[in-house]
Image (cartoon, rainbow, N blue to C red):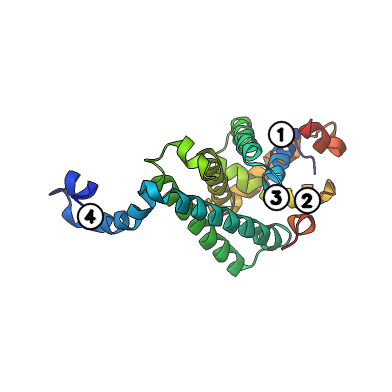
Amino acid sequence: MGATATQTYLPEIAPRSARDWEFVKSLLQDLEAEEHREELASLFGQWKLSIKAFRRVEERRMTRQSPDPFDWKFHKACLCGLISFGTMLQIATTEHKSEDLAKDGFHKDLLDALLRDLHNTFDEWHGQVSEDRIKELSEDIFRAETSPDREDSRSKVSA
Amino acid sequence: MPRPHLIEKIHDLKYRLREPRLSASEFVKTQQEYDAAISEACRKYHCAKAELLAAIRSDFGKWVNQQRLPWLDETESD
């Protein structure tokens, strides 16, 4: 294979940085190849299964009970891993047409939506909002307003 | 504790995003609605997204219980 993108476009500018990125780029080369669309779809499927498993543990350890310090760390580590892998998939599929990927069961719009959802979860739990600010805002939100149809809210929201 | 309708809507959309049988197209649509509801709430309460989500996260579990909705473990098997 000829010169790669970083060699071509970054020959003398920040060569150290270019070498670092070259390593990552080499990892992605296989994923970018057209003949490996099926592998991409397979990786996408595995990633979705990982998210599914993550959500179940998240619900059990973070939502239904008070998370302990290890829960917080594992949640953050797993979440960052999922975001990282999903972002790599986004990069790897840049050169592929959505229609071609869809033939192998890879839906780019779903990938994007899943990633946005994971980013929201990161903001929700690890957004570095101070406890004072959380308390202040919670009081603002839940203090003043009473929903008139609170008991039947889900059926109304779903309608 | 009073719970604004907009917050209930956000909880409901989040719950639906976790439903295991949600189709891909439904997930994409619901995720967009979830983001839109969050943005609306951020405007209403003059706060950043991370602040809003952190402020209401502990209320989500209470809402699920109040609505008597099943948890993920109760809706699917391994």
Count of numbered labels shown in the rendering? 4
Q: Residues within 10 Å of mark 3 (few under 14, many from 20)?
A: few
Residue at image point 18% right, 50% down: A3
Mark 2 belongs to chain: B
Say if labels 1 and 4 share a chain. no
**Cα distance between the residues tagged 3 and 4:** 42 Å
- Chain letter of mark 3 equals B
Q: Nearer the viewer, residue A4 or A152?
A: A4
Residue B6 tag number? 1
Image spot of residue A12 (x, y percent): 12, 49
Of pointers 1 and 2, the one earlier in the residue sequence = 1
Judging by the rendered image, the residue that carries numbered circle 4 is: A17
* Secondary element at image label 4: helix
Task: Say which element carries label 2.
Answer: helix
Front disc: 3 or 4 = 3
A103 or A51: nearer the viewer: A103
Q: Which mark is residue B20?
A: 3
Residue furthest bottom as drawn:
A70
Residue at the spot of label 2 = B62
Task: Judge if badges 3 and 4 mark residues of a common chain.
Answer: no
Which residue: 61% across, 32% down? B36
Give the residue type at disc 3: Pro
